[in-house]
Amino acid sequence: MPSKDLRADADLIIKAALASVDPSRAVKDALKLDGERLTVGRQTIDLGIYKRIIVVGAGKAGAPMAQAVEQVLGGRIGAGRVVVKDGHGAPTEIIEIMEASHPVPDDRGVEAGRSIANLVREEAAPDTLFLCLLSGGGSALLVAPAEGLSLADKQQTTRLLLASGADISEINAIRKHLSRLKGGNLARLAAPGRLVSLIISDVVGDRLDVIASGPTVADHSTWEDCRDILVRYGIWEQVPAPVRQRIEQGLEGIIPDTPKPGDSALDGVTNLIVSSNRMAVDRAMGQAERLGYAPMLLSTTIEGETKDVARMHAAMAREVLASGNPLAAPCCLLSGGETTVTLGEDFGTGGRNMEFALAAALDLDGLPGVLAVSVGTDGTDGPTDAAGAWADDHSVARGREQNLKARRFLERHDAYNFFKPLGDLIITGPTRTNVMDLRLMLVTGAEE
């Protein structure tokens, strides 16, 4: 039987999941050096034919990934530049680590993007091997506004998309078409060099063209997609005029689209996913089973409005207790993926993981023996210092004791300020990885 301390058990499950997607270990598992032979996944590269090895990259996991590459290749690396989120840096010997703002890009991101583009352009040659390290957050960190656009144009567009409820795939489709590096353009700059991308996936379905906005892969999104996304979310008229003008010029054929499948610049490119949400969920299931819970994976591809997803999870926990379906307690219901929160005009402080916990708390109010947990594997949830939150049958009542009305906080998307006074925020600090979110429901029923 599992411990009656559900939070302690959930903490062990979360830690096991995060350990399984450690960026450094993932890179070292993917790269093996034997003399002049570098094995990358199932491919072998003869380093003897390359005069230079250049490392570039972007994302929250960039620093530990860069450290791992240095440990494998050491002095063989000629130069490197990797941009990471503020506070996610780490010491390196050869590869320069630059920090910038996320999720809304800033001037440092622009400078980092320019610096990386210049390095790739200067080193591009048939005898150059590029290693590109990509992870979640790369889209906002690798900033290179297209001609005619300013950083302010991209910042405002990003803010509007984030607030609209658009998912990561839709946001990245726009980003690609406003950038000089995304959507395969970094690979175009690296040609005719050999390019290998090591990728930590932070998107549902592990789509290579979506992760970090696909700087090293062909782009399937189009100018038409960009217009449709902005229109569908009602922000076409709100985005800056230069953004609309660029999309309109693309629709008219004045500006070429991003590189598509078959582009010769992509011939020398290898893209390898080294870590993903599936790996984290699999390890979480194993840990739950060791603790005495029957684990059940609901899905690693869950999307949609956060509060609706939370209610579905809570309903399943109720069903377990009522009928023993789809499995009997004690059990652990797990899911991964990335949900969205659609903000109105009046909103507070929070993120999708804290909002999941708050919505679940309302449905679990008074139902003993159930703990709901949701965490962002990167250690941050929205613009806060929290990774997520816990919720159980006492959460709403405990809030009420402090004059905190849970439903009102949910309506205002202000979960952070509901859970903080209760001491129910999950604070991990930067994990320096990012494989989307991990949600779990521990279900044991009423205590004896």
Image (spheres, rainbow, N blue to C red):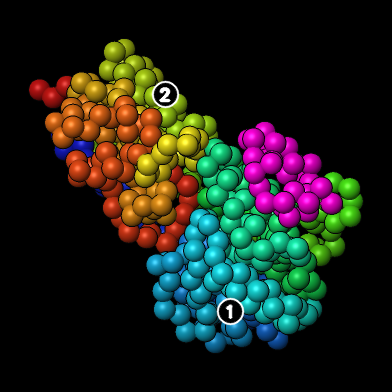
Q: Label 1: which residue?
A: 80
User: Taking 169 as reference, is 90 above or below it?
Assistant: below
> CA gap, disc 1 to disc 2?
46 Å
Q: Looking at this rendering, what residue extends furthest in the top direction?
A: 323
Query: Where residue 204 sits in the image (x, y, percent)?
Result: 56, 42
Does any portion of residue 57 appear in the rendered image? Answer: no
Q: Is residue 43 left or right of residue 327?
A: right
Element on which disc 1 rests? strand
- Amino acid under label 1? Gly
Picture coordinates of residue 332, whole percent (x, y) = 32, 32
- Residue 45 on image: x %, y %: 68, 72
Asked whether residue 182 appears in the rendered view, the answer is yes
Q: Is residue 152 left or right of residue 270?
A: left
Q: Is residue 232 left or right of residue 222?
A: left
Q: Residue furthest right?
A: 253
Quadrant location, the C terminus = top left
Label 1 Cα neighbours within 10 Å, binned few <14 / some 14-19 / many ≥20: many
Give the structural element (helix, strand or loop) at label 2. Answer: helix
Q: Which mark is residue 312?
A: 2
Q: From the image, which quarter does the N terminus lie in?
A: top left
In the rendered view, tell whether residue 144 sits above or below residue 349: below
Query: Looking at the picture, which amino acid does disc 2 mark?
Result: Met
Asked which quadrant contains residue 262, the reply is bottom right
Q: Residues within 10 Å of mark 2 (few under 14, many from 20)?
A: some
Q: Residue at x 44, y 58 (%)?
A: 433
Whether residue 151 appears in magenta in the rendering, the answer is no
Marks 1 and 2, the one that precedes in the sequence: 1
Residue 112, given in percent of the width and then of the height, sits at 59, 73
Assess whether residue 241 is covered by the magenta stretch: yes
The magenta stretch is: 220-249
